[in-house]
Image (spheres, rainbow, N blue to C red):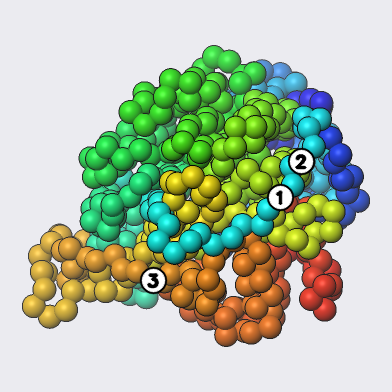
Amino acid sequence: MRFAPIPCAVVLLCCVLLLCSIPLGTSFPVQDEGKPGITFLEEVGRLRVGFNWRNLTCPVCKVLFTILDVALLSDVNEERVAWAVGEACIRLHLAEERVCRQITELFRDDFIRALQQSLLWPSEACALLVGRSCGRFDIYAPWNVTLPRIPKPPVTPPAPPKPGAPQSRVLFLTDIHWDQDYAVGSSADCKDPLCCRNESGSPSWNQRAAGFWGSYSKCDLPLRTVENMLENAARTGPWDWVYWTGDIPAHNIWSQTRKQQLSELTVVTRLIHSHLGNLKVYPAIGNHESTPVNSFPPPFVHGNRSSRWLYDTMAEEWAPWLPEQALKTLRHGGFYTVEVQPGLRVVSLNMNFCARENYWLMVNSTDPANQLQWLIHILQASEEKGEKVHIIGHIPPGLCLSSWSWNYYHIINRYEGTITGQFFGHTHMDEFQMFYDEATMTRAVGVAFIAPSITTYVNLNPGYRVYLVDGNYKGSSRFVLDHETYILNLTEANRQPEGGVSSLLPTTSQHAIFHPDPNPKWTLLYRASEAYGVSSLFPSDWDGLIRTFLQDDRVFQRFWYLRHKGHVSEPCIDACKTTVVCFLRSGRYDELEQCDLLEFGGDMVSAVRKTLC
């Protein structure tokens, strides 16, 4: 077990730099610690939200943390240090002054109180921020979970069901990101990390204005678009059940409060109840549900700084959907399991316990809340009962901390005959990640579906997913047989043809002259089997599709278009294509960190996928 408190000076400056990146048993293969790591700045530098990350050099970083660590030896200096961190954010042009001040104030108390006793030197802190050339950072030491000493049963490859066999229609919702301050006609091209808001100001002559139903920019959604989506989804049914993988609040992470987060959780939960009726909904927790964002202390943290304020409200609001035992583990650590139907169980994981942006994991990253060990217990019991299991969560496992991701991958390998579906969100894109047998890394054993977001952030159409799953009958595989993606085309929704309604909203600038459709239609963008010419969607089919991407660029470019929910400006070629293929093949973080394409005739490449804040 690795236990290492971090100096609050380190974490306070990290929280400013994380403003948008806020936009790792038995018979284990040996975890490779020798691969070159991806630096913090390389990872967050891809977020394209107006921050100048490269202004922090190694010498400047070490001087800053030396001063801050010395200052924080005395409690009386906390206020001064907080001011200094905000000033550094401003002087380094990491964000606008207002954002720098607010984010520092929001994060200050939790970081300072929780991590005042420092064991991290400036060289270690700067290794995290700048890279290994500036020091060494190994807080996230390797660890292993323990698997039962029970042999893995023989695995029978899945086969298509007989014609006419029942299917389950599953509605999948993720990444709503409702912005209470969304303002039609405001600037969609402001300097803040989030635009289309009251505080974004009016657009200048060369800027876009926020649309009525949403905007192609770094903007989230008004509530009316969320409600319109739910109305459309209700009409598109009937549904057998719903998976909902979190991220309710907007991306204004520098100015959020607990009261606001709980209010938005309550409003959206009740909207879902209202529009979808008595359907069973199985939620998972996103990284934006808490404030500060990504702050999810494991259960060893008690009192006001624990996540009790959030989990208790979730349990109260989600009680109509979940049994008491599930609510008990939800209150404890934000995860649970429920029998969906006889023979099918869902496990909802709290993926914030694997997220590198969750600073509490710097205190102790070894299987937080014993969640993976609990997962093994559930899977073993399901294996013995002959149940199939679906896993839902927010952050895809291939984007997790290395050791967490490694252990999860090993669990998927061991229980490949039991786990028949993995469903995630978080990236806002329509994509997937593969899992291969650990012995050869060639046979596909699983696929993690990553569904598109409801929000437009960044530059996307709103969308939602429908999964068609092998249905409720004896011997059902419970695998995903097909899936559909529905979108709201903002170009059409925000611009009603001549004769349409033109008086739906007040104007706030000369740009805000809209003719929005008062009742826009969400349309089918594509069906996977038809778009890719496949008869089934088993793991082997997705592995075959990746090979097709490499052989037939037309198919890959179709995927690229659909990945962006039908709104993309340019094709993805050369290094872009290589990086995307690496991401698709890499359900384990170390494979993503250094993706080997030799089997396809390529070279070893470094590929990091951005994670949206």
Q: Amino acid at mark 3?
A: Leu
- The foreground one among 230 and 64 is 230
- The foreground one among 171 and 119 is 171
What residue is rendered at 65% in x and 22% in y?
A: 114
What residue is rendered at 48% in x and 25% in y?
A: 326
Q: Nearer the viewer, mark 3 or mark 1?
A: 1
Write down the residue under mark 3: 525
- Pointers 1 and 2 in contact (C-beta within 8 Å): yes
What residue is rendered at 49% in x and 71% in y?
A: 529
Q: Amino acid at mark 1?
A: Val
Q: Is residue 263 visible?
A: no
Q: CA distance from mark 3 to mark 1?
A: 35 Å
Q: Is residue 480 visible?
A: yes
Q: Residue 361: x, y in percent?
A: 69, 32
Looking at marks 2 and 3 on the same chain, the residue that comes earlier in the sequence is marked by 2
Q: Residue 406: x, y in percent?
A: 76, 45
Q: Residue 475: x, y in percent?
A: 53, 47
Write down the residue under mark 1: 155
* Residue 515 quadrant: bottom left
What residue is rendered at 62% in x and 67% in y?
A: 541
Disc 3 crowd rating (10 Å Cα; few below 14, some 14-19, many 20+) is some
> In the rendering, which numbered label is found on residue 10?
none
- The foreground one among 84 and 574 is 574
Disc 1 crowd rating (10 Å Cα; few below 14, some 14-19, many 20+) is few
Q: CA distance from mark 2 to mark 3?
A: 40 Å
Q: Is residue 93 above or below residue 317?
A: below
Q: Left of 422 or right of it: where is 462?
A: left
Q: Is residue 36 above or below residue 570?
A: above
Write down the residue under mark 2: 152
Q: Left of 601 or right of it: where is 297?
A: left
Q: Is residue 473 above or below residue 292?
A: below
